[in-house]
Every structure is written in C-alpha cells, then in structure tokens.
Amino acid sequence: MAKIKPRVKVPSKAEAGEVITIKTLISHPMESGQRKDKSGNPIPRKIINKFVASFNGQEVISADLAPAVSSNPYFQFEAKVPEAGEFLFQWTDDDGSVYEAKKKIKIG
C-alpha cells in the first residue's frame, strides 16, 4: 500500500488580523468500495471522510467527504490570523485512522 502523506502550505509569518491562504493535500489511495479483487470479492471502501483544520485549538474549517471524493484530496481556503500560533490539520479515514500535520505561524 502507498504511504499516506499529508502536506500543507502555510505562510511562516503574517500580520495580526491578516487573511492568509492555506493549501493542503493528502496522498491517499482512495478505494470506493465498488471494485472487486481478482477473486471477485468486493474491495472494502477506504476513503478520507473528514477534514478538519484548527488554529490554536479553535476550528477554522471542517468538511465531511462523500464516497465520490477523488484520490489525494486537495483543499485551499483562507483563514484570518489574529495571533501567533499553530495550525493543526486532521484527515480521518474510514478505518478510523487520523493523519495529522501541524504548522506554526509567527506574527510580524
């Protein structure tokens, strides 16, 4: 199985109150649950079904994903940065696995 790797792009610093653009991508081989293996058995569904981004413990964005989501889901969104802190990004898989990435941002 391919390695599941989250990647995020957040500016290293911003001005207090500035709106920044954040880009995220997770390398994840999605499986819809519709295909069958060589023996004719269904391959279990395995998708990223939830994405959450928070800043200093406060949720910024949350998305519930449906089975039609593509492999390697990409999100781009904007967030207002009131202070220095840390973004936490979490992707949840059907099997309960949670993949995380963190990025700090400075003010100045």
Image (cartoon, rainbow, N blue to C red):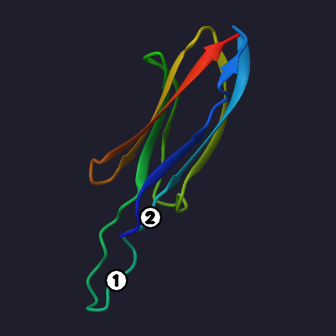
Residue at the spot of label 2: 30
x%, y% of residue 36? 34, 83
Q: Quadrant of residue 50?
A: top left
The circle on residue 98 is: none
Residue 78 shown left or right of residue 60 in the figure: right
**Position of 28 relative to 31 (above/below):** above
Q: Of discs 2 and 1, which sits in the foreground?
A: 2
The residue at 30%/69% (across/down) is: 44
Q: Quadrant of residue 4?
A: bottom left
Q: Earlier in the sequence, mark 2 or mark 1?
A: 2
Quadrant of image for the N terminus:
bottom left
Q: Residues within 10 Å of mark 2 (few under 14, many from 20)?
A: some
**Position of 57 relative to 72 (above/below):** above
Q: Quadrant of residue 100?
A: top left
Furthest-bottom residue in this view: 39
Do residues under tags 2 and 1 come within 8 Å of each other at their CB atoms?
Answer: no
x%, y% of residue 6? 48, 48
Give whichever of 53, 8 is nearer the camera. Answer: 8
Amino acid type of the residue that numbered disc 2 sits on in the rendered structure: Met
The residue at 59%/21% (across/down) is: 105
Residue 11 shown left or right of residue 33 in the figure: right
Amino acid type of the residue that numbered disc 1 sits on in the rendered structure: Lys
Secondary element under disc 1, as helix, strand or loop, is loop
The circle on residue 36 is: 1
The residue at 73%/19% (across/down) is: 19
Quadrant of image for the C terminus:
top right
